[in-house]
Amino acid sequence: MANTPQSKKRARQNERRYAVNKARRSRIRTYLRKVEEAIAAGDKDAAAVALRAAQPELMRGVTKGVMHKNTVSRKLSRLSARVKALG
């Protein structure tokens, strides 16, 4: 339990940051799910559009510190390869 004023403030900041990061992660997962669903449906055009929409969201997650740069690069690379293979 936080006792000092500084630790109480830190606890409040952590709660707010946790909520923001959770929302960002959820938003990123939604964009990824749209790409996955388009790939599963076999719709190359929709998958390509969804991937183009997902890329900036993923990179924003990197700049905000929600995800690691290499993780996002790996996900984008694998998704783009799967979209390319649909044709």
Image: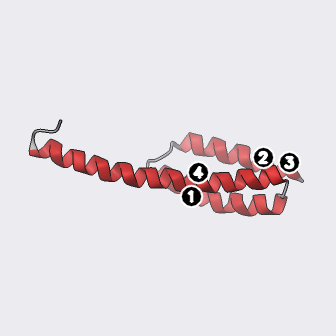
Asked if marks 3 and 4 touch (Cβ < 8 Å), the reply is no
Asked if 68 appears above or below 23 in the picture, the reply is above
* Other-residue count near label 1 (Cα within 10 Å), few / some / many at <14 / 14–19 / ≥20: some
- Dot 3 falls on a residue whose secondary structure is helix
Residue type marked 3:
Ala
Gap in Å between the C-alphas at discs 1 and 2? 19 Å
Q: Is residue 26 visible?
A: yes
User: In which quadrant of the rendered view does residue 41 lie?
Assistant: bottom right
Residue pointed to by mark 1: 57
Gap in Å between the C-alphas at discs 2 and 3? 6 Å
Residue pointed to by mark 3: 85
4 sits left or right of 44 in the view:
left
Q: Which residue is found at the position 18% from the left and 35% from the top?
A: 1
* Other-residue count near label 2 (Cα within 10 Å), few / some / many at <14 / 14–19 / ≥20: few
Asked if 46 appears above or below 3 in the picture, the reply is below
Gap in Å between the C-alphas at discs 4 and 2? 19 Å
64 sits left or right of 84 in the view:
left
Task: Indicate the position of residue 64 as horizontal and vertical percent values.
Answer: 44, 53
- Dot 1 falls on a residue whose secondary structure is helix
* Other-residue count near label 3 (Cα within 10 Å), few / some / many at <14 / 14–19 / ≥20: few
Asked if marks 2 and 3 touch (Cβ < 8 Å), the reply is yes
Q: Earlier in the sequence, mark 1 or mark 2?
A: 1
- Dot 2 falls on a residue whose secondary structure is helix
Residue pointed to by mark 2: 81
Gap in Å between the C-alphas at discs 3 and 4? 22 Å
Residue type marked 4:
Arg
Residue pointed to by mark 4: 29
Gap in Å between the C-alphas at discs 3 and 1? 23 Å
